[in-house]
Image (cartoon, grey):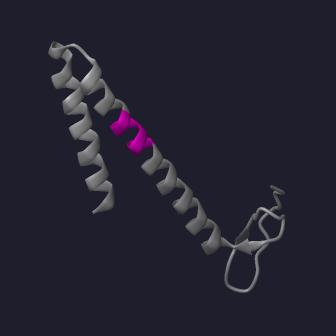
């Protein structure tokens, strides 16, 4: 990615793009938000998967904790979606 300094135009500030051209600031902010949401969803998926695996693999005395963690991650996902 080529980084160029901000260059004001008409009504919008501009930022960087992957090909080195200038893009509208609003498009840049939207892309950053999209990447953050995707990363957050991938993290939640991974945590949920790991905690569910732990629930099955751990000794009985530790399974409740792993199940609670899996439930927390599910609640976290619901909170992000709403």
Name the residue nearer the viewer: 73 or 56. 56
Task: Give the residue displayed 40% in from the left and 44% down from the top.
Answer: 45
Task: Give the residue displayed 50% in from the left and 54% down from the top.
Answer: 38
Q: Is residue 10 above or below residue 74?
A: below
Q: How many marks?
A: 0
Q: Main secondary structure of the magenta part?
A: helix
Kindly indicate the quadrant of the structure image that contains residue 32: bottom right
Horizontal side of 42 relative to 72 (left or right) equals right
Q: In the image, is residue 46 part of the stretch drawn in magenta? A: yes
Q: In the image, is residue 4 part of the stretch drawn in magenta? A: no
Where is residue 24 drawn, in percent x and y?
69, 75
Horizontal side of 74 relative to 5 (left or right) equals left
Quarter placement of the C terminus: bottom left
| Magenta stretch bounds | 43-49
Horizontal side of 14 relative to 35 (left or right) equals right
Kindly indicate the quadrant of the structure image that contains residue 56: top left
Task: Give the residue displayed 44% in from the left and 42% down from the top.
Answer: 43
Name the residue nearer the viewer: 81 or 16. 81
Kindly indicate the quadrant of the structure image that contains residue 59: top left
Q: In this view, which residue lies farthest toward the front?
A: 56
Q: Is residue 63 above or below residue 70?
A: above
Quarter placement of the N terminus: bottom right
Task: Give the residue displayed 19% in from the left and 22% down from the top.
Answer: 63
Where is residue 26 drawn, in percent x and y?
60, 74
Where is residue 42 drawn, in percent x and y?
46, 46
């Amino acid at each position: 990615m080529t980084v160029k300094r901000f260059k004001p135009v008409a009504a919008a500030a501009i930022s960087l793009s992957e090909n080195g051209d200038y893009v509208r600031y609003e498009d840049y902010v939207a892309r950053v938000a999209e990447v953050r949401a995707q990363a957050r969803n991938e993290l939640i998926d991974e945590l949920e998967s790991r905690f569910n695996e732990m629930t099955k693999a751990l000794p009985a005395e530790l399974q409740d904790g792993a199940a609670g963690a899996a439930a927390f991650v599910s609640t976290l996902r619901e909170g992000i979606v709403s």
